[in-house]
Image: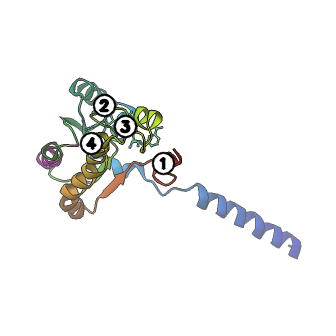
Amino acid sequence: MSRLAWAGLVVVLAAVGTGVYWSYDGFDPETIRGATVVITGCSTGIGEEMAYQYARLGAKILITARRENRLKEVVAKAMSLGAQEAHYVAGDMGKAEDCERTIQTAKEKFGRLDYLVLNHDGSSVKNIHEFFGTKSWDEDPDMDFFVDYLNINVVGYVRLASLALPLLKESKGHLIVVNALNGRCPMYTAY
Ligand SMILES: NC(=O)c1ccc[n+]([C@@H]2O[C@H](COP(=O)([O-])OP(=O)(O)OC[C@H]3O[C@@H](n4cnc5c(N)ncnc54)[C@H](OP(=O)(O)O)[C@@H]3O)[C@@H](O)[C@H]2O)c1
């Protein structure tokens, strides 16, 4: 083979290797079969869909949110999609006792925890878009909303993570936090 042909072959192999490297995410769906997973904010939206994805992969899931009727429906669908087990805890993640009940229930039902997925997003006072869309801080700072929002979406996340940490350490498990681009690009500061 000529030098040119060798060079061409090397380029082609390098291109294929790079393509495989970039497209391979290292995820083996079999690692989820039988894994124990707690997901927050599952009565709707991204959390609900994540519950179904874990269910399809044969995980044992425990889901939370405040609306019990929705959680029952999600649990039933998750079981029909292939979850090995599906449970729910109806509770407010802004309340310490509900966070404790969630992790305690996971411990009792599963005896271990492989994944904690923190995803819930809410306020018991009002919708965040309504809040930021209609008011500015110098006009009418709504501290009740702010404290409530941070309690549910920041303190609640830290509380759940710290409660679950002993179980996650034991299983060498994973803590997954669903976030938004707004966390990196705080667009609301422009108001
Ligand atoms: N959708 C997007 O375009 C988008 C973009 C960027 C980031 N995200 C992030 O993705 C995550 C999910 O977003 P999403 O759009 O799926 O949200 P969503 O549809 O509004 O769902 C929020 C979930 O959180 C639960 N929740 C709200 N307040 C709660 C509380 N006090 N205690 C317990 N559960 C509570 C809600 O259930 P109940 O009302 O039944 O309690 C619901 O299941 C969030 O962390 C969000 O920041 C979403």
Which numbered disc flags the more N-terminal residue, 4 or 1? Answer: 4
How many angstroms separate mark 1 from mark 2 (CA)?
A: 23 Å
Tag 4 near tag 1, CB within 8 Å: no
Q: In which quarter of the image is ligand 1?
A: top left
| Residue at disc 1, CB closer than 8 Å to ligand 1 | yes
The verdict on residue 52 being magenta is no
Please give the residue where the numbered disc 4 appears in the rendered image.
148
Q: Is residue 2 visible?
A: no
Along the line of sight, which residue is nearer the eye, 185 or 119?
Answer: 185
Along the line of sight, which residue is nearer the eye, 56 or 157?
Answer: 157
How many angstroms separate mark 1 from mark 3 (CA)?
A: 30 Å
Q: Measuring from the top left, give residue 81's x and y in whole percent.
A: 34, 31
Q: Which residue is drawn at 88% across and 72% down?
A: 4
Magenta segment: 100-109
Q: Which amino acid does label 2 sit on?
A: Ser
Please give the residue where the numbered disc 1 appears in the rendered image.
182
Q: Which amino acid does label 3 sit on?
A: Arg
Classified by dominant secondary structure, the portion drawn in magenta counts as helix
How many angstroms separate mark 2 from mark 3 (CA)?
A: 17 Å
| Residue at disc 2, CB closer than 8 Å to ligand 1 | yes
Tag 4 near tag 2, CB within 8 Å: no
How many angstroms separate mark 4 from mark 1 (CA)?
A: 19 Å
Q: Which amino acid does label 1 sit on?
A: Asn
Please give the residue where the numbered disc 3 appears in the rendered image.
56
Q: Is residue 89 above or below residue 177?
A: above
Please give the residue where the numbered disc 2 appears in the rendered image.
43
Q: What element carries label 3?
A: helix
